[in-house]
Amino acid sequence: MTNQSHPPSGWYPVGDSERYWDGLAWTEHVRAPAAPPSQQPPAVDRHGLRHQAHPAQQWPAPQPQTWVQPHPLPVGYVAPKSPGLSLLASFFVPGLGSIINGDVGKGLVIMLGYFVSFLLVIIIIGIFGVVGFWVWGLVDAYQGARLWNARHGFVG
């Protein structure tokens, strides 16, 4: 004789209903299938705010799309630099226009040279440096913006 283990006792689905298994044999007890547990109302936290179910439980899963939504701008799009804005920035702070154009190293050299020359104004030679670095900053800011636009395909 073999020792067989039987499923535990309980209600089991049979067709469109459920039947009770006592652990050894089926009984005559039959019932309608148990209804799935209803969703619990949203919980209320200690602040009195109601919590809703996770959005993934509320909405069906998204279906895969066969088309790709176009971007409003092409990938890698860059805005043109404004030579006038760069010139204006360098008018007030020499070297700032070059920094705006992306030439940070050159802009810092112009800015540092201007401020050192400004300190050397006490000695007459500082005046030439101030004017020279200021004009260099203006010209480089304007030309740098135009060259940047030309490299990136902007005409004008």
Image (tube, rainbow, N blue to C red):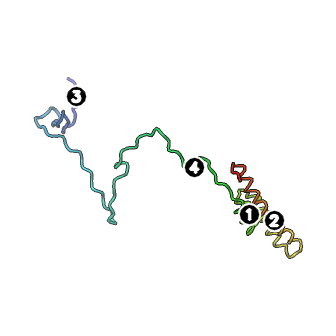
Q: Position of residue 79 (x, y in %)?
A: 64, 54
- Whether residue 66 is situated above or below residue 96 in the rendered picture: above
Q: Position of residue 130 (x, y in %)?
A: 83, 69
**Disc 2 marks which residue?**
135
Q: Which of marks 4 and 2 precedes in the sequence?
A: 4
**Residue type, numbered disc 3:** Gln
Alpha carbon of mark 4 to alpha carbon of mark 1: how far?
28 Å
Say which element carries label 3: loop
Q: Which of marks 3 and 2 precedes in the sequence?
A: 3
State the residue at coordinates (77%, 63%).
138
Quadrant, the C terminus = bottom right
Q: Is residue 52 left or right of residue 106?
A: left
Q: Crowding near pointer 3: few (<14 within 10 Å), some, many (20+)?
A: few
Q: Nearer the viewer, residue 131 or 53?
A: 131
Q: Crowding near pointer 2: few (<14 within 10 Å), some, many (20+)?
A: some
State the residue at coordinates (52%, 45%).
70
Q: Nearer the viewer, mark 1 or mark 3?
A: 1
Q: Is residue 15 left or right of residue 72?
A: left
**Disc 1 marks which residue?**
87
**Residue type, numbered disc 1:** Leu
Say which element carries label 2: helix
- Please tell me in which quadrant of the rendered image residue 117 appears: bottom right
**Residue type, numbered disc 4:** Leu
**Disc 3 marks which residue?**
4
Say which element carries label 1: helix
- Whether residue 128 is situated above or below residue 155 in the rendered picture: below
Q: Position of residue 86 (x, y in %)?
A: 71, 62
Q: Nearer the viewer, residue 124 or 154?
A: 154
**Disc 4 marks which residue?**
73
